[in-house]
Each structure stands twice: as structure tokens, then as C-alpha cells.
Image (tube, helix red, strand yellow):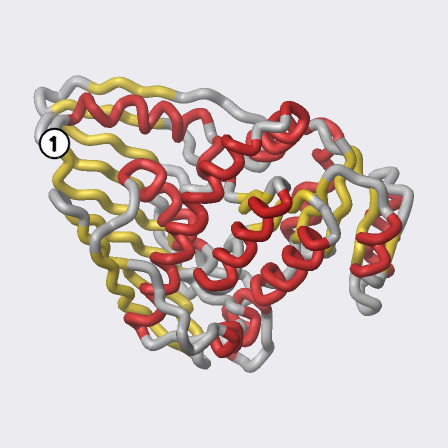
Amino acid sequence: MKLAVAGTGLIVQTALPHLRGWGWEPAAICATERSVGKAREFAEAYNCPAVYTDYTVMLSEVDADAVYLGVPNSLHARMAIQALSAGWNVIVEKPITSNLWEAERLADLAKEKQLFLYEAITTLYQPDYATLKAQLHRIGTIKLVSCNFSQYSSRYDAFRKGETFPVFDPAQSGGALMDLNLYNLHWLMGLFGTPDQVEYRANMDHGIDTSGILLLRYSDFQAVSIAAKDCGAPCQYSIQGTKGYLMQHSPANECGEVILHFNDGREEVFHTPTQHRMEMEFRTFAQQMQTGNLDACYAILAQSLEVSKIQTQARQSAGIRFPADHDIPKDYLLKE
């Protein structure tokens, strides 16, 4: 499978060295004029035959099976729509878009054209996450769920001094909710579906949420989801039931070892080692595209839409607005 890549940031740098091993041959890299030197270095290092600074030209000239968008959040919708409109399958880094309206536009276009559209969310493809889901029934009736993905950002000090980075920039749809808490939401909603109510209590700094707590109400239990880029703590995910609890001590983008603890003190530990946190998602994308399994793709896409809905509602509850929200038609109603 051939893959065109847009972007030269950290996530692209993380994926590029491994793509061939995961079933993808880099076909082209598109960069801005400012970062084209970096793109050329990557192309040489990873045997990629073409470098572009014009995304439209790349889409028109390159022969590949999909384009991978590793660009700032605010660009996801526009660049994905452009690619889908040109007949390309799309893998877009998380979050799929800035808001639900954009996400629904992408999904409708992909389905209209019968193209693959993926949000690159590692959580859903980890084998230990599948194990966690399979063990849920053993802890009885769920009562409480807690997630904490707190990671002090290496850029936070510079941000507080006035430097602007996409992850801390409201103009680029940044913030802790759109970054680390997105993994938590996929972890939660992949297990339990869409909550009945959501409220976001955010710590704001320079107009962006640098940390915050999501309160999620389900019909028969409560969940809390914490994410922070301005402070750190051990990652911890727990599901408490009437017969015991399930625990993970790894972030939701990795989903490592699962501990099953019963009320009588017995414990079972489950773990399937993986080489790289991004491996299984890219292998899954390649396999589904090769077999033409659009149904599987669209089932995952449906969850991305639900997560985008909850993110949009959460931002509304905290009074956080992005420039991208101004494009939403006045007659658009957020789906309940």
C-alpha cells in the first residue's frame, strides 16, 4: 500500500521510520515552505520519492492508496475534504476535526464517494484494550469509571512565556480536551458508548484549556476523565464494579497491561506485548483497504463522530470556542 504524507511534525516523525514495516510505502511528503528542508531529509532517510510544498499538486500528481494528514487540528477538515473530493482515501490524525459539524461533513462525503476515512486513534486497536473490553462482564455491575492522562508538556514553559504552539493555540483548535482527553473519550466510549450528559470544567490559560476534568453521566454509573498538559501525574484508568475492578496504569493511547482484581483479593493480569503504539492502527487500515471493508471503517468512523459530538458539547459547557466554530451554519443543530 502506498501512502502520501502531509506534515513534518512530531507525529509524522514518529510514524515515518516504521511505515514500511506496517505495510505502507511512503509515496510523497508534503510540507510548508518553512519545513521543506526537513521533508527532504525525511524523504532521503526513508526512501520516499517525492517532496511537495503544494498539497493540491501532490493530490493531483501522486499515485497512492491514501493520504495521511499529520497537520494542526484546524486544518484537518479542509485538507480531508480536499482529498476526499479528489477521490483519495484519508487517514487523519486525531481529533478528526475541530467540531461535530466538520466531522459530519467529512463522514457524509466519504460515504457518498465510498472512500475510506479514518481518525488515527491508537486506543481502539491495542490488543490489551480488546482484552479490557472482554473482561468487563467479570466485575459485575459498573458503578464508577475514572481516567487520568496527565503529562506535563515540554512546551508549557515556553507557552507561558508567550510562544505559540499548535497544541496550545485556540486558533488551531488546540487544548487538553482535543489532545489527551480525546484518548480518554475514545477509551470510555469504546467500552460504554455515548454518555447521557457531559460537563467540562477547564483550567484556562491564554484562552486555551491546559487541563480539565470531564464529568460524564451514564444511565447507571458515573465517569470522570482528567487530562492535563500543565501538570503531571501517573496515568491511571479504573473501572469499578460490584464484584471487583479493572485497572490500567498506562495512558489510553497505549493501553497496556490489564489488572483484574476481585473483591476477595484474587487478581489476574493480562498483557499482549506490542512493538509500537501506532502499529496496529496502520496495519488495520491497510488490511481493511486491501479487502475493501468499508463497513468496518464506517463502524469506527461512527464512534469518531460520537466522540466529536461529546467534545463539542464539552467545549460549549466550558465556553471554549474555536475560530472553526464560526463556520457552522446558523441553522445547524447539534445532534442530541
Q: Residue at x 20, y 24 (%)?
A: 137
Residue at 57% x, 28% y: name it: 293
Residue 272 shows up from this direction: yes
Quarter the C terminus occupies: bottom left
237 vs 94, nearest the viewer: 94
Left or right, 180 with respect to 286, comes to left
Question: How would you rate the neighbour count of disc 1 (Cα within 10 Å): few for under 14, some for 14-19, many for 20 or more?
Answer: some
- Residue 198, relative to residue 170: is it above or below? above
Q: Number of marks in the image?
A: 1
Q: Is residue 191 above or below residue 217?
A: above
**Which part of the image, by quadrant, shows the N terminus?**
top right
**Left or right of 154, for residue 139:** left
* Residue at the far front in the pictured view: 112
Residue nearer the viewer, 77 or 105: 105
Q: Kindly identify the amino acid type of the residue bearing the numbered disc 1.
A: Thr
Q: Residue at x 59, y 77 (%)?
A: 163
Q: Position of residue 335 (x, y in %)?
A: 33, 60
Note whether residue 170 is visible. no
Residue 260, percent across and down?
24, 24
> What residue sits 47% from the left and 30% below the top?
126
Q: What is the quadrant of residue 267 in the picture?
A: top left
| Up/down of 289 relative to 3, above or below | above
176 horizontally vs 269: left or right = right
Apparent side of residue 115 relative to residue 334 in the rendered image (left or right): right
x and y, in percent, of residue 37 in the image = 86, 60
Q: Position of residue 307 (x, y in %)?
A: 39, 51
Q: Which residue is mark 1?
A: 141
